[in-house]
């Protein structure tokens, strides 16, 4: 049977000041489990001790400086009575560096010595060259120099200058090579040193052993900060006839100073973020244009857009298949992933990926485009959101047809369906243009009428048919004196409140279809309206 004690406050140093050092048991402890929250983690350590009957101080050494002392919990075997728990800092302890780090430091010292030698040798070359050129005069002004002596002297100068040049380039090449090695060593050492903390923190558990102990267990758990995780996804779709494979992963970052080696992980969260990236049409409110008077404090603000609604209906039932890399459970306030495989996460403040689970979801595929905002065809997959239990909102890398197409977002707030943007399909071309021959401005009395006709042409250059949702809009009046009349909807589905027009086209391979719509705007000719 296991007994436990919760520590809500610490008596710092009171017990240690009177404790006999010979009764201290310093034993290697092993981190066995880590539960990671959004901005902290619960660490569980296990110690095994051998001792005779009596009172001892069991020391848990080299702990993170980010411990929340009020969170400490100690559990022990039945033969052990926990008397007290305290905290201390052992500032005299020196952290032992790994052999690889020691080797890099020795190498850096050797490289710096070589660079100093190269610099000295190059300075010597410069000195010799300057000395030789400073004493280049031979003979005297009266007698001059003989021809054969001049030739010998020139040959000597030529030889020495070539030697200077050769040695200079050789040293420069070595200097550049050693400088590159130095920079790499310094970078690796800086990364190591930046991730290292002085692990002088210690937890001392005072215990009483009622009998001789052999391999008795004491478990210590505590919360630490400077750690957290974020969900992210890989979305892979082979083609528009295949299911959507969603791999949920976690990016874990920790700089606690403690190394997690082959530990069992549990991840928990309750506050996923929201996101999305498909462009959405907003209601285009039409009103009179009024120049802004920057000297006036009464600047008119535009009206906010009306809320948008979902329109398409799923045409198939969706069943999810999950490949479990983590056991998943959901409570009223959070979701927990218990990872089935142990992981090692170093204390380097760098993100480390952990696989959680894979969902294989049948989907309805449709191409969508909003050419007024962007001339691109977006491939969209729609899956049943009620099968995405335990799915958290996060950024996703999208791979479509074996190619990375960009990033999208998985939105955990979806209730009925989840729309996934799989990127663009450049094999489908689109053009939106205003037909000038069917557009005009006219005046009747005090009223101005603007007639507009727009045409959108979509060409499918693929070898198979595609289904495309086209969205466009006409402006919506927010003024009584402005009248907007849709004269030709072009067989579009019209939302009068927002002015949205929608078409669904089934375009055969290597064929085109066109959507055309017309509208009129009437308003007093002595006023201006905003652009639409």
Image: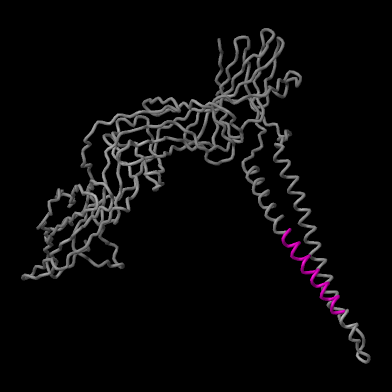
Residue furthest out toward the left = 445
Q: Which residues are magenta?
A: 153-174
- Magenta segment's dominant SS is helix
Q: Nearer the viewer, residue 123 or 41?
A: 123
The location of residue 477, given as percent across then percent down, is 15, 57
In front of the other: 393 or 477: 393
x and y percentages locating residue 416 in the rendered image: 26, 34
Residue 366 position, x and y percent, is 26, 44
Q: Residue furthest bottom?
A: 142
Height in image: 445 above or below 287?
below
> In the rendered view, does 223 fall on the left or right side of 498?
right
In the rendered image, the vertical position of residue 468 relative to residue 168, given as above or below: above
Q: Quarter of the image for the C terminus: give it.
A: bottom left
Q: Let me know if residue 146 is in the magenta part.
A: no
Residue 188 location in percent, x, y? 65, 46
Q: Residue at x 60, y 12 (%)?
A: 77
Decide if residue 520 is on the left or right side of residue 251: left
Check residue 173 for magenta coloring. yes
Residue 342 found in image quarter? top right
**Disc count in the image?**
0
Q: Is 336 placed left or right of 346 in the picture?
A: left
Q: On the rendered image, what quadrant is the N terminus found in? A: top right
Point 67% across, 27% down: residue: 61
Q: Write the residue at 76% across / 56% down.
A: 115
**Farthest residue toward the top?**
211
- Which corner quadrant of the image does residue 485 belong to? bottom left
* 129 to 360, vertically: above or below: below
Q: How is the image coloured?
A: one colour
Foreground residue among 475 and 140: 140
Q: Is residue 292 left or right of residue 172?
A: left
């Amino acid at each position: 049977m296991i007994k436990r004690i919760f520590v809500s406050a610490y008596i710092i140093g009171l017990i240690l000041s009177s404790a006999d050092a010979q009764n201290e048991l310093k034993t290697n402890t092993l981190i066995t489990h880590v539960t990671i929250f959004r901005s902290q983690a619960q660490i569980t350590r296990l110690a095994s001790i051998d001792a005779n009957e009596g009172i001892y101080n069991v020391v848990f050494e080299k702990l993170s400086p980010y411990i929340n002392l009020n969170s400490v919990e100690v559990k022990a075997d039945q033969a052990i009575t926990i008397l007290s728990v305290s905290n201390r800092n052992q500032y005299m302890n020196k952290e032992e560096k790994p052999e690889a780090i020691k080797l890099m430091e020795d190498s850096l010292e050797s490289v710096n010595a070589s660079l100093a030698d190269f610099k000295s040798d190059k300075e010597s070359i410069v000195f010799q060259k300057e000395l030789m050129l400073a004493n280049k005069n031979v003979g005297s002004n009266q007698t001059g120099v003989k021809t054969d002596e001049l030739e010998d002297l020139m040959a000597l100068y030529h030889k020495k200058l070539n030697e200077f040049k050769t040695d200079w380039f050789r040293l420069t090449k070595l200097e550049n090579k050693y400088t590159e090695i130095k920079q790499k060593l310094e970078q690796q050492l800086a990364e190591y040193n930046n991730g290292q903390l002085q692990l002088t923190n210690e937890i001392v558990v005072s215990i009483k052993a009622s009998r001789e102990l052999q391999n008795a267990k004491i478990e210590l758990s505590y919360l630490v900060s400077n750690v957290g995780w974020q969900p992210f996804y890989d979305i892979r779709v082979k083609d528009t006839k295949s299911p959507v494979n969603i791999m949920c992963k976690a990016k874990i970052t920790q700089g606690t100073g403690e190394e997690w080696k082959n530990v069992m992980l549990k991840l928990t969260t309750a506050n996923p973020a929201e996101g999305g990236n498909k462009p959405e049409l907003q209601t285009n409110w039409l009103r009179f244009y009024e120049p802004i008077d920057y000297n006036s404090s009464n600047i008119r603000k535009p009206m906010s857009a009306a809320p948008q609604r979902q329109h398409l209906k799923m045409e198939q039932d969706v069943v999810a298949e999950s490949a479990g890399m983590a056991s998943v459970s959901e409570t009223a306030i959070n979701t927990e992933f218990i990872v089935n495989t142990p992981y090692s996460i170093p204390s380097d403040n760098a993100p480390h990926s952990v696989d959680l689970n894979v969902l294989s979801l049948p989907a309805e595929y449709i191409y969508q485009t909003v050419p007024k905002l962007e001339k691109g065809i977006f491939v969209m997959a729609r899956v049943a959101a009620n099968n995405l239990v335990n799915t958290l909102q996060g950024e996703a890398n999208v791979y479509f047809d074996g190619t990375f197409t960009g990033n999208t977002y998985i939105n955990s707030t979806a209730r009925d369906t989840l729309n996934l943007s799989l990127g663009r399909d450049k094999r489908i071309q689109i053009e939106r243009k205003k037909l000038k021959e069917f557009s005009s401005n006219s005046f009747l009395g005090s009223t101005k009428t603007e007639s507009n006709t727009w045409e959108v042409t979509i060409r499918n250059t693929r070898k198979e048919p595609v289904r495309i949702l086209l969205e466009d809009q006409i402006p919506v009046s927010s003024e009584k004196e402005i009248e907007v009349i849709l004269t030709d909807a072009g067989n579009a589905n019209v939302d009068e409140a927002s002015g949205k027009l929608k078409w669904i086209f089934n375009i055969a391979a290597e064929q085109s279809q066109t959507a055309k719509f017309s509208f009129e705007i009437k308003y007093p000719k002595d006023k201006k309206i905003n652009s639409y």
